[in-house]
Amino acid sequence: MKILYAAGLSLKESSLYRLWALERLGHQVVPFNTFDYLPRNPFVSKVAHRLSAGPSVNRLNRDLLRVVESEKPDLFWADKLLSMRSATLDRIRAMGIATVSYMIDNPFGPRRDPGWRLYMKNIPHYDLHVVQRDKNILDYTSRGARDVIKIQTAYEPTLHFPPPPGWSDADCDRDVSFVGTPYDDRAQTLGRLWRECGFSVAVSGSAKLWGRAMEADVFKGTFRGGELYSEDYRNAIWRSRINLSFLTHSNQDEFVHKSFEIAGCGGFLLAERSAGHLQRFKEDEEAVFFSSFDELAEKIRRYLPDEAARRRIAAAGNLRAARDGYHNDRQVGLILTRIQERVHQEQAIFGK
């Protein structure tokens, strides 16, 4: 299959990993990097994102149609594409090209992020929407979506894999570790672990965001380097005795891709308890969970000095993630199967 893949493409984005999975599955992928259409002026870029309008949006839609007409793909895959117009999408579908939208975020959630104006209008125009939450299935169908499938986030097997044989705590320099963003009350939670409980906490991510979210002494005592991607991200998981994973409640998460990445890397996963996590990992055997600060602190005290238990649980979690397909190849394959089934159904209905 020939697939035109429109997304923000960089090693910092999981969208690139899904492109790699499509190629590994044997498809011809034509990349369309939407980052090329971001205005260079930061203020103009912010306004264009909020309004989903302006010269950059015009150029993206024009160029996208030009590439479609030139490449004639079988499938158009939009990965969190917020600046496409409904008329552009309708023209693509009128050419007989199947269309799928993959959305990792929640446009219906309480976080109220800006930039969704055009995307919301496009919901009835795609053949298939890929979402991450059960709740979103009803959200999208109530907005006129033709078809919706829930697919979990995933780890990238070419980047997220276990450490070499013989790896041990002697190779670790991070006790309680979190790599990510300070959504919800994460900064307060990590600060309490450091200040009240006396744990050695290592936090990596945007220095600007964490510096704003944390008290000065907490930031100084816990922040370890900047944003980590690719090999640096994997190495941080390897070098961590305990890897924390929080749900983003403001995004109504059921699970988070970080949990699957930690498992894929063979790391010890201590994640926020949820139905989504419990369905995917056996508690205290393949991962460890918490529901409150006190339970989080208790689990850290229990497992931090017990390397044997951590290594056993991490290995079991890694095997579960591989066996049940918590990786991009499996999850992307499920999406392609669904879109192919839908195309075949429409062909049968219309006699094509």
Image (cartoon, rainbow, N blue to C red):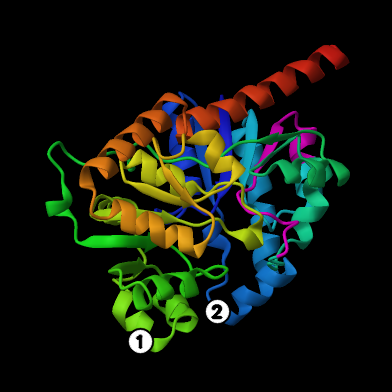
Which numbered disc covers residue 217?
1
Note whether 140 is above or below 335 in the view shown.
Answer: below
Determine the residue positioned at 37% across, 81% down.
218
**Mark 2 burial class by Cα count in 10 Å: few <14, some 14-19, many 20+:** few
Question: Does the magenta run of residues contain 204?
Answer: no
What's the amino acid at mark 1? Asp
Marks 2 and 1, Cα distance to the nearest angstrom?
34 Å
Specify whether residue 109 is painted magenta.
Answer: yes
Question: Which residue corresponds to mark 2?
Answer: 41
Element assignment for label 1: helix
Q: Is residue 179 above or below residue 31?
A: below
Q: Which residues are magenta?
A: 91-110
Q: Nearer the viewer, residue 247 or 78?
A: 247
Which x, y percent locates residue 307? 22, 47
Quarter that holds the N terminus: top right
Helix or strand or loop: what does disc 2 sit on?
loop
Q: Is residue 157 left or right of residue 305?
A: right
Query: Local crowd at mark 1 within 10 Å, few (<14), some, or many (≥20)?
Result: few
Q: Quadrant of residue 115?
A: bottom right
Q: Residue at x 68, y 67 (%)?
A: 113
Q: Is residue 229 visible?
A: no
Q: How many marks?
A: 2
Q: Amino acid at mark 2?
A: Asn
Residue at image location 70% in from the left, 68% down from the top: 114
- Residue 286 visible: yes
Mark found first going from the N terminus, 2 or 1: 2
Judge from the rendering whether residue 153 lies leftward or rightward of residue 351; answer left or right.
Answer: left
- The vertical placement of 328 against 289, above or below, is above
Q: Position of residue 210 (x, y in %)?
A: 44, 76
Q: Is residue 314 above or below residue 203?
A: above
- Residue 241 lies, in percent from the top left, at 26, 54
